Image (tube, helix red, strand yellow):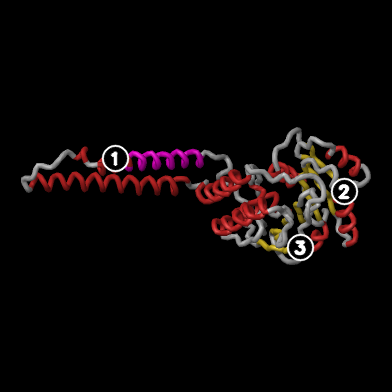
Amino acid sequence: MLNLSIVIPAFNEEESLPELCAWIDKVLNEHKLTYEVILIDDGSSDTTWKVYQDLASKNANLKGIRFNRNYGKSAALNRGFEKAIGDVVVTMDADLQDSPEELPELYKMIVEGGFDLVSGWKKKRYDPLSKTIPTKLYNWATRKMTGIYLHDFNCGLKAYKNEVVKAVEVYGEMHRYIPILAKRAGYAVIGEKVVLHQSRKYGTTKFGLERFINGPLDLLSITFVSKFGQRPMHLFGSFGMLMFIFGFMTALFLGLEKLYHLSQGVLPGLVTDNPWFYISLVSMILGTQLFLAGFLGELVSRNNPVRNEYKIREEI
């Protein structure tokens, strides 16, 4: 088995690949670490794949996958994780902003430090403010929502035990939340290392405005599914029950109030003239619907073929 599998998603990175592959080879050979590079060409429109093919013909450690079109970084990582066979799996970007000099230390932290996952922290960034400010906001929100206190969830340079990448499924925009997926899968020993960040040498940034929308939605999706995916009634049923009880008690109060006035010889107005009647009615209807949604969710969950699939780390 190899020491390292280095998974590198690439999109239009033809200029940086020769320098990156040579740098990786130099660093790992100096530290006598066996490795493989798995590059995933995510539908590049330039000569990225041809350049990599030429490099791979001269270095047997270079392997690759070429997508037919652009599927995104999460899809690239997911396929790279499936193919990785190294004891430690490292992800890094192809734009030379992640330094291969960090690889030996990341490997050491996983193998000797006992970490399941080590995330890079680009403490000093050379990105424009339009990227660094949203990144800081995302990191703050993610720390608060997940309880995982990493400084830089967005850092592409991360190292994992091989078993960790085999236990998580990465899709959508989930690549920046892999530490959360790993923790949910039972791999909670998560470390952090300050890493060098270099300014982009070739090409242009792939940072797009869609991340402002997709990122938070995926974070909410992870949080919801991990907490309530196996027990949807706990969420929908709880809210539904509370709303129904609120509506029922409000309607009961209105009815008792009217009966009291009648017993006192006072002619009360119509209950339907009171806006609280409609509030109570809507609350009971919504409460019933939420309860039914939870019930349907439970039926779907119980018919899920992998509902009893659990990750087992070891047996004796």
Camera-near label (3 vs 2) is 2
Q: Is residue 85 visible?
A: no
Q: Which amino acid, mark 1?
A: Leu
| Callout 2 amino acid | Asn
Residue 300 part of the magenta-drawn span: yes
Q: Is residue 198 visible?
A: yes
Residue designated by label 2: 61
The Cα–Cα distance between marks 3 and 2, rounded to whole angstroms, is 21 Å
Disc 1 is placed on an element classified as: helix
The residue tagged 3 is 111
Pick the residue in front: 1 or 117.
117
Could you tell me if the residues under marks 1 and 3 are in contact, i.e. CB atoms within 8 Å?
A: no
Mark 2 surroundings within 10 Å by alpha-carbon count, few (fewer than 14), some (14 through 19), many (20 or more): some
Q: Main secondary structure of the magenta part?
A: helix
**Residue drawn at (79%, 51%) of the image:** 200
Q: CA distance from mark 2 to mark 1?
A: 68 Å
Q: Earlier in the sequence, mark 2 or mark 1?
A: 2
Please state the extent of the stretch shown in magenta in the rendering. 283-302
- Magenta run includes residue 128: no
| Residue highlighted by disc 1 | 281
Residue ID at (43%, 39%)? 293
Foreground pick, 156 / 300: 156
Rendered image quadrant of residue 110: bottom right
Q: Determine the secondary structure under disc 3.
A: helix
The picture places residue 270, in percent across and down from the top left corner, at 17, 38
Query: Residue 119 or 231: which is nearer the viewer?
Result: 119
In this view, the residue in front, 194 or 104, is 194
Q: Residue furthest top?
A: 68
Name which of mark 1 and mark 3 comes first in the sequence.
Answer: 3
Residue type at numbered disc 3? Val
Spot occupied by residue 139 in the image (x, y as percentages of width and height)? 61, 56
Q: Residues within 10 Å of mark 3 (few under 14, many from 20)?
A: some
